[in-house]
Amino acid sequence: VQPNNYSTFYDDQRQNWSIMFESEKAAVDFSKQVCIAKCNSSPALDSVLCQDLLLGEGQGVEGGDSLEVAYTGWLFQNNGLGQVFDSNVNKDKLLRLKLGYGKVIKGWEEGMLGMKKGGRRLLIVPPAWAYGAQGVAGRVPPDSTLVFEVEVRRVKLAKECSASDGLSVSSRDSPAPSPVPSSDGFSSD
């Protein structure tokens, strides 16, 4: 997935292709279908399949970062998106979570790494990385593969510190401390 509704990919002969879509929706829908096709063509899904839909901006999230997320979850049924079992998209509250703390399913912990603020991603999560053999009573049958579309709306990096000017700065943005302004070479005006 590239900016401005572009996607690039390699075919079986390692030839590079680029597609420009007429709209963001068309690009997103195509990317979803690519991820579903990857799932359907793999003999056994033993890890999370991730497909970026929109890239977002800024720093990729890591373990320890706090996120606010909008999401929709579907059951993977008949080789595609089945019934929606959970969503907060049209609700007032975003889901707040801290990556790496085991408060969400393992599929989210892995599948959301590297996402950026404003980014959207499709995750196809095998049962072992979701709710497994127990499922969720009344919502997720046992041994269900799940599909989530997740959008990161807000990010608070774990390593945030407050700079002297009051702006929030991430230590991951600047590996070296910023130089302190010195008087040599600059006039006071």
Image (cartoon, grey):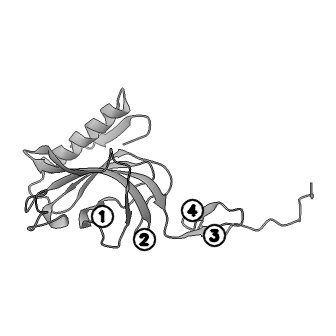
Tell me which label, 1 or 4, sits earlier in the chain.
Answer: 1
**Residue 85, image x, y percentages:** 18, 51
Which label was assigned to residue 142? none
Work out whether mark 1 precedes mark 2 in sequence or the reverse, and give the earlier one.
2
Q: Give 137 or 100, whichever is nearer the viewer.
A: 137
Label disc, if present, on residue 176 of the rendered structure:
3
Q: Is residue 79 above or below residue 129?
A: above
Disc 2, SS: loop
Q: Is residue 18 above or below residue 163?
A: above
Identify the residue shown where x is 14% and y is 63%: 136
Q: Earlier in the sequence, mark 1 or mark 3?
A: 1
Q: Nearer the viewer, residue 60 or 140?
A: 140
Relative to residue 146, is residue 120 drawn left or right?
right
From where the camera sits, is residue 62 visible?
yes
| Quadrant hosting residue 79 | top left
Residue at image mark 1? 110
The residue identified by callout 2 is 64
Residue 47, percent from left and from top: 20, 62
Q: Amino acid at mark 3?
A: Ala
Give the residue type that dot 1 points to: Glu
Name the spot of residue 45 as percent of width and height, x first: 14, 58
Q: Secondary structure at mark 1?
A: helix
Query: What separation in Å lies between label 1 and label 4 (alpha carbons)?
Result: 22 Å
Q: Are marks 1 and 2 in contact (CB under 8 Å)?
A: no
Which residue lies most toward the bottom here? 101
